[in-house]
Amino acid sequence: MMPRSNEPGYGRSMDPIALADQLIAANSYLTLATVDEVGDPWSTPVWFAPDGRRGFVWASKPGARHSQNIATNPSVAITIFDSSKAPGEGSAVYAAARAAEVAEDGRDAALEVYNARSLERGLATWTLDKLSGGARHRLFRATVLQLYVLDDHDERVAVPPAP
C-alpha cells in the first residue's frame, strides 16, 4: 500500500530510485503504449510483474492488438501510476523499452518472475503449458532502455533501470 501524502517518505520529493521502486512495487497494472505498422497508437493496461527496474513481464494473447503491434514494432512506452491520487499528489514511472514475446529459452526465467508477483499478490501461479503450444496466452517482456520519474517541479529525472 502506498503511504498517504501526509506520511513520511511519500511523494516526488523522495529519492528518485526509491520513488520508482515504490511505485513499481505498489501497483499491479502498467499502461503499455504501442504503435502499429502505419504508426497508429494503441495503449492498454496490463497486469505486470517487475524484474527489478530492468524489465516487466506480462501474459497476453498473441492476437491482442498490443501484442500484434509489438510483433511489428518492439518499441514501447510504459507508465506506472497510482490513479487514486489527487492531481499534484501522485507521481509515475515512465519507461522507454523494447518488448517481445518471451522466446522459449527465456520462458522459465520470465515465468519465475511472473509467478513470484502472482504469489505476492495472492493469485494463482501459471505453468508453461498455459503459456505455450496451443494455449491462449504467451509471456511478453519489456526490457527497459530509459526510466524516469517526475521531480517536485514536474521535470523528468532519469532513474537507473537496474537492478
Image: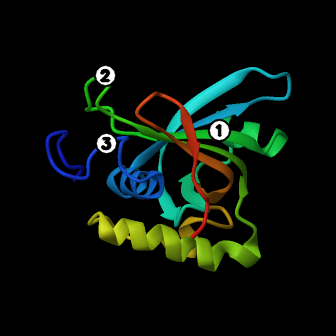
Determine the residue located farthest toward the left in the rendered image.
Answer: 6
| Contact? badges 3 and 2 (CB < 8 Å) | no
- The type of residue carrying mark 3 is Gly
- The type of residue carrying mark 1 is Ala
Closest to the observer, 163 or 134: 163
Q: CA distance from mark 1 to mark 2?
A: 22 Å
N-terminal of the pair, mark 1 or mark 2, is 1
The secondary structure type at the circle numbered 2 is loop
| Contact? badges 3 and 1 (CB < 8 Å) | no
Q: Quadrant of residue 67?
A: top right
Badge number at residue 11: 3
Residue in the image at 57% along x and 70% along y: 163
Q: Is 20 located above or below residue 40 in the figure?
A: below
- Residue of label 2: 87
- The type of residue carrying mark 2 is Pro
N-terminal of the pair, mark 3 or mark 1, is 3
Image coordinates for residue 107, horizontal then vertical, percent: 65, 73
Q: Quadrant of residue 142?
A: bottom right
- Residue of label 1: 77
Image coordinates for residue 83, horizontal then vertical, percent: 32, 32
Residue in the image at 55% along x and 72% along y: 111
